[in-house]
Image: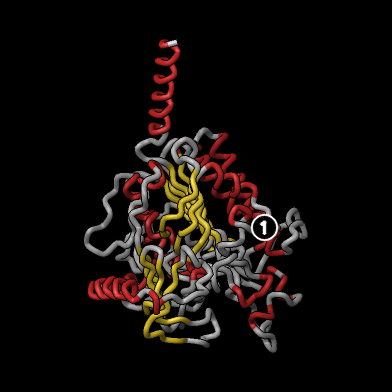
Amino acid sequence: MRTILTIAILLFAWCNLRAQDGLNAKPNVIIIFADDLGYGDLGVYGHPTIRTPNLDRMAMEGQKWTNFYVGASVCTPSRAALLTGRLPVRSGMASRTNRVLFPDSRNGLPESEVTLAEQLQSAGYATACIGKWHLGHKEPYLPTNNGFDYYYGIPYSNDMDIRAGLLDGVGYFDFFTTPAGRETESYNVPLMRNTEVIERPADQTTITRRYTDEAINFIKDHREKPFFVYLAHNLPHVPLFASDSFLHTSKRGLYGDVVAEIDHNIGRVIETLKSEGLAENTIVVFTSDNGPWLPFGVEGGSAGLLRDGKGTTWEGGMREPCIVWSPGNIEPAVITDLGATMDLFTTFSQLAAVPVPEDRVVDGLDLGPVFFRGEASPRQDMFYYRGDELYAVRMGDFKAHFITESGYSGAGRETHDPPLLYNVNVDPSEAFDIGAEHPEVLDLIGQLVAEHEAKMVKGEDQLKDRD
Ligand code: MG
């Protein structure tokens, strides 16, 4: 009996050791970024009819985060935050005049910024950016000048470059459901390989599959060395396109078809990692750049029970699904602590043993202890900017709004003094203002903001200059 017990204990200890040993010193990193997918748009996050079996399984096998944030509620600044680990206001990738970069924008991510790709490249990683970039499409700003060995994708949003004349007499938000709006040829967006345009207009009906093919090839080609793949799908940002195999398959309509196709292709990446024997030495993170684009009605996604969507500093604009998967290294768990895309910069830099830059403020925190040991998250607060203005702050359970504004119409800007206050763990829909009952919380948040603003150095606006 004693022998059996001893063997059992030894076996347990060995398995435990194996679990911690699974990751090499430099594990592979894959970040899959959806565009405008809302908090409520995955099966595992509660959508009743969008089928996402692959992401659901990854969430069951890994960590499902329920309080995970992006650095801004629109594409360009959100992507800058992810890749630099910094609030976009610091790099100048957030602006009052233009919320994102446009095809006639002159600038992009400043060269002085350090990207996660540059960090990992310096540690010997092979690095690929596949998909939407949106941090500057002029040559100095392209991924290949920002730490990526390889780029394949549409360098900005898939709705930009609508062909001349097509919008005449049609409202922008109505165009996408017109016959012309349904044609991929109506959007003259370029598809690039490294610094060359290889297809224009890009055929968006096959783009999700083709991005995945590129990612899979890169993984297979670099299976012997550490790799970082940043796979940033252009969809489900409008205009929505699905391939023939997915069209008309979802009860949720075209939006559901598109999300199901993304999910299917994420399954292909996971299968590749398994068949190549790489799964146990790879960390896959799935999240989205901002909340659903609500003015599009059923063409846009859903933030579930969170309030509002893309473009706003309500929870629906900036809280996103986040799934972290690495079999044998990350225990299944639902994480209700705070995390943010900026933290991935710091987490993966630490994991690859690359020092985080010390000559600037880096907002990202190391989530490694949460990922690998289930410890409490170091993140206690979150600053919600719109452009270069601070609109709201979360501190622990509480969130104070100083300014609120609708997503895109420019209407409804309201300043709140005293600020609105919500307990977003108790009231994730931000329906019940409890400021009057908790003046002490507002005081503490006020102190936090004062400290934050005293040290804030805003970068020069990179989005304002256009041709
Ligand atoms: Mg977006």
User: For the N terminus, which image quadrant?
Assistant: top left
Three-letter amino acid code at the position of disc 1: Thr
Tell me the residue that label 1 is attached to. Answer: 206
**Up/down of 442 relative to 32, above or below:** below
How far from the left and from the top, in percent, is residue 191?
Answer: 57, 63
How far from the left and from the top, in percent, is residue 91?
Answer: 33, 70
How far from the left and from the top, in percent, is residue 331?
Answer: 47, 40
Whether residue 111 is visible to the viewer of this picture, yes or no, is yes
Nearest the viewer among 96 and 149 is 96
Which residue is depicted at the point 59% across and 50% down? 212
Nearest the viewer among 369 and 170 is 369
**In screen coordinates, is 165 left or right of 449?**
right
**In screen coordinates, is 135 left or right of 447?**
right
Whether residue 193 is visible to the viewer of this picture, yes or no, is no
Which residue is depicted at the point 68% across and 68% down? 184
**In screen coordinates, is 174 left or right of 426?**
right
Tell how many labels.
1
